[in-house]
Image (tube, rainbow, N blue to C red):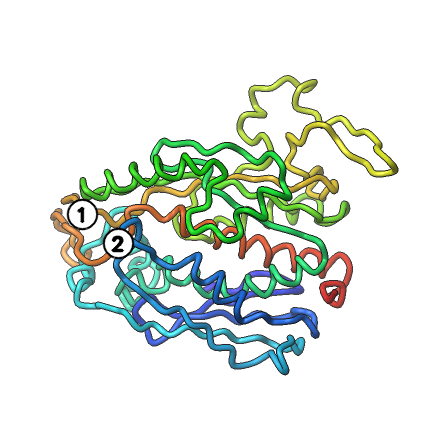
Amino acid sequence: MKNTFGSSVSVTVFGESHGEAIGAVLDGMAPGIAVDEDFIAHQMKLRQSVGALSTARREADKVRIVSGVFNGKTTGTPMTLIIENQDTRSRDYGELAYKARPGHADFSANMKYHGFQDFRGGGHFSGRITAGIVAAGSVAITALRNKGIRIGTHILSCGGVYDRSFEDLIDDIDRLGDMEFAVLDEAKAAEMQVAITAAKEDGDSVGGRLETAVTGVPAGVGEPWFDSLESVLAHALFSIPAVKGVEFGAGFAAADMLGSKCNDCFCSENGAISSSTNNNGGILGGITTGLPILFRTAVKPTPSIYKEQQTIDINTLDNTTLCIKGRHDPAIVHRARVVADSITALVLCDQLAMRFGTDWLKA
């Protein structure tokens, strides 16, 4: 299984949803970066299930750092972050050993691993594995902030309700940092939550879209062609369970524009190069322009729903039905946004280390 991402700065995820523990190994991070355990705990809380909008599974998500940190700072050697699973209820998944849940990886995993995979709670394919990404990403976010680079993600849409897009990027990103339900127009939060609750009461689920902005990345970061910054970011973002689409800048809307409207015309202001538009999302030729990096991520509805669904018995190939039990999220987009921040930070640390050297990440 390919569980490692990155070249100079890399992250490896491990564990299963109902196993003893999950976590991540962060390797290649510059030595001397302050590790703020309070900030790690804060980021983990943003990913946790909260109230009726999320699964009833309640995990403490206490991160235990067992290597790579000494006297509160990174040593430059592999940093191992472990998170114990404490609130598992594996009996809810007994039927899933042979009945494939629609929308989940049960069938495809069975075909690849011949039935030896841990199916409980989705096993290694569970969104729970993203907790390790958030833990590692917290260290990456700290390193980037020290270099003047900031990342923020909000819920652009959920259940058919739309938030406003970014306006004042710095102010908007700062506001999002502490929000459990991250929207820029707070009136939209209540409408989204009504849509989530309605789906839950009907035994169903909803999806949504995230919008991410990154400021402060210097021009010249990235590669052309197969390792373009868009390619690498999309590669990592598609690793988040339930992500089914990524678009940069104007994205698919650019296909309907005239070139004269889509092009971002350059200008110079007080010795700094800028542009009045950013339809290309801060990346041209796979390389940063110095403008903010902007992209959107589509998150499908949670596949675990309480309606009866058609499926198959993997062992007999008989048609059958399945009614999922257990504790599941009616929506995951609000929890996925901190995962998007985290994986973006990990990608950027890797790309910046390759461009300027590992030690550049140390303030």
Question: For the residue carrying disc 1, how many other residues have a C-alpha within 10 Å: few (<14), some (14-19), or many (20+)?
Answer: many
Q: Secondary structure at mark 1?
A: loop
Image quarter in which the C terminus is found: bottom right
Q: Amino acid at mark 2?
A: His
The image position of residue 155, as x and y in percent, is 45, 41
Question: For the residue carrying disc 2, how many other residues have a C-alpha within 10 Å: few (<14), some (14-19), or many (20+)?
Answer: many
- Residue located 22% across and 47% down the image: 305
Q: Judge left or right: residue 274 versus residue 331.
A: right
- Residue located 75% across and 48% down the image: 218
The image position of residue 307, as x and y in percent, is 16, 44
Q: Judge left or right: residue 120 versus residue 299.
A: left
Image quarter in which the N terminus is found: bottom left
Residue 328 - label: 2
Total marks shown come to 2
- Residue at the extreme front of the image, as rendered: 187
Q: Amino acid at mark 1?
A: Tyr
Residue linked to disc 1: 306
Residue 188 - label: none
- Residue at the extreme right of the image, as rendered: 271
Q: Secondary structure at mark 2?
A: loop
The image position of residue 290, as x and y in percent, is 74, 42
**Up-down: is 260 above or below 356?**
above
Separation of residues labelled 2 and 1 (CA atoms)? 9 Å
- Residue located 67% across and 75% down the image: 76
Q: Judge left or right: residue 147 versus residue 156.
A: right
Q: Nearer the viewer, residue 360 or 237?
A: 360
The image position of residue 205, as x and y in percent, is 27, 42
Q: Are the residues at dot 2 and dot 1 in contact (C-beta closer than 8 Å)?
A: yes
Q: Earlier in the sequence, mark 2 or mark 1?
A: 1
**Up-down: is 38 above or below 245?**
below
Q: Nearer the viewer, residue 346 or 149?
A: 149
